[in-house]
Image (spheres, rainbow, N blue to C red):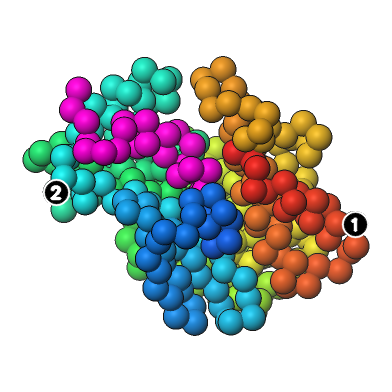
């Protein structure tokens, strides 16, 4: 097996499996990354974005204003910088040995193959001709399932459908869907996701979206995506939070209700190893971290109920050690 220069294969396989470099991930703050990886880095930033590099590893953050904290955008390993290429066949063999294989998805159309480990939300770009890994990043923007499939309907059709939907009452929406929805389950799932995406593209941005007819239609479509199996309970809560579809207190309550595990029982990096035997616990911890972060973002919008604020704060204290 070829070795990619001074970096052991475990450096790359660990990033795919855990989504972390030395314990730092895409949700880590700049201060946390420094504490974990040290201060031997190069960095550039302006008022809204910040990029830091540790040799192959990069971390990026964004913020809306200088008064806001830095929110993580991505963590990335720039494997194309290696003197000795990291071959996907070698990395794939190591990941299968560890029990964490990746899944190949549709190529990007630009000369790259794409692979994903969906539980860690890590994606890999691989040169089609040489088989060399070019980039490994999290969170990935590609994956499997209806949310990532190419739509079978035009953007114009989606715009027309959702503009009609937004003017209907709840009963009217149901009657319209009964006439229009595809019969095949897989196609129907893709259709509901396409409608949700089309609706959100037309909805007003930011806080103005809450309470609008567009938000009402989008919430209805989130429910339909759940019924069709496109979204599970936690994913639905994350969509509602990320798309600003409900007021802050309702959004936080939805995120907390979707927690797959309690704070007392959640797996952490101190208690649980990233092994195949612990995969269920690891993935529950990952989902809890995503929900905690989504709920935490709502605090800036002005969550009023003290109990909700306290519960979110308790989850956020755990966030750095969640999987």
Q: Secondary structure at mark 1?
A: helix
Residue 314 horizontal/vertical position (percent): 80, 51
The foreground one among 278 and 218 is: 278
Indicate yes or no whether the magenta region holds residue 25.
Answer: yes
Residue at (55, 38) in percent of width and height: 229
Residue at mark 1 to residue at mark 2: CA–CA distance:
52 Å
If the image is split into quadrants, where does the C terminus sit?
Answer: top right
Which image quadrant is residue 32 in? bottom right
Q: Are marks 1 and 2 in contact (CB under 8 Å)?
A: no
Residue at (38, 55) in percent of width and height: 54
Residue at (72, 46) in percent of width and height: 318
Residue 146 appears in the picture as rendered: no
If the image is split into quadrants, where does the N terminus sit?
Answer: top left
Magenta stretch in the rendered image: 1-27
Relative to 33, is 100 on the left or the right?
A: left
Q: Residues within 10 Å of mark 1 (few under 14, many from 20)?
A: few
Relative to 60, is 110 on the left or the right?
A: left
Q: List the residue tagged with mark 2.
A: 111
Which image quadrant is residue 63 in? bottom right
Of the residues under marks 1 and 2, which one precedes in the sequence?
Answer: 2
Residue 73 horizontal/vertical position (percent): 48, 61
- For residue 115, the mark is none
- For residue 307, the mark is 1
């Amino acid at each position: 097996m070829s070795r990619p220069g001074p970096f052991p294969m475990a450096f790359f396989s660990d990033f795919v499996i855990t989504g972390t470099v030395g314990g730092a991930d895409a949700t880590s703050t700049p201060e946390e990354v420094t504490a974990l990886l040290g201060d031997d880095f190069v960095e550039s930033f302006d008022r809204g974005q910040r990029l830091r590099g540790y040799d192959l590893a990069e971390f990026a953050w964004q913020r809306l204003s200088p008064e806001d904290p830095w929110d993580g955008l991505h963590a990335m390993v720039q494997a194309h910088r290696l003197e000795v290429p990291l071959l996907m066949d070698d990395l794939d063999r190591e990941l299968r040995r560890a029990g964490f294989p990746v899944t190949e998805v549709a190529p990007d159309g630009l000369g790259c193959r794409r692979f994903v480990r969906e539980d860690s939300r890590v994606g890999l770009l691989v040169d089609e001709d040489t088989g060399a890994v070019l980039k490994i990043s999290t969170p990935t923007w590609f994956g499997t399932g209806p949310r990532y499939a190419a739509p079978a309907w035009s953007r114009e059709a989606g715009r027309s459908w959702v503009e009609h939907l937004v003017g209907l009452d709840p009963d009217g929406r149901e009657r319209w869907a009964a006439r229009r929805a595809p019969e095949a389950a897989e196609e129907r799932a893709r259709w509901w996701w396409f409608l949700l995406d089309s609706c959100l593209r037309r909805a007003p941005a930011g806080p103005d979206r809450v309470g609008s007819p567009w938000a009402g239609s989008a919430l209805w479509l989130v429910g339909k995506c759940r019924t069709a199996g496109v979204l599970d309970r936690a994913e639905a809560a994350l969509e509602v939070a990320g798309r600003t579809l409900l007021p802050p207190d309702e959004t936080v309550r939805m995120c907390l209700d979707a927690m797959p595990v309690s704070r007392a029982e959640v797996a952490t990096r101190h208690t649980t190893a990233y092994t195949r035997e612990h995969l269920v616990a690891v993935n529950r911890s990952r989902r809890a971290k995503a929900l905690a972060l989504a709920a935490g973002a709502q605090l800036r919008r002005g969550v009023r109920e003290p109990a909700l604020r306290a519960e979110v704060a308790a989850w956020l204290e755990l966030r750095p050690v969640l999987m």
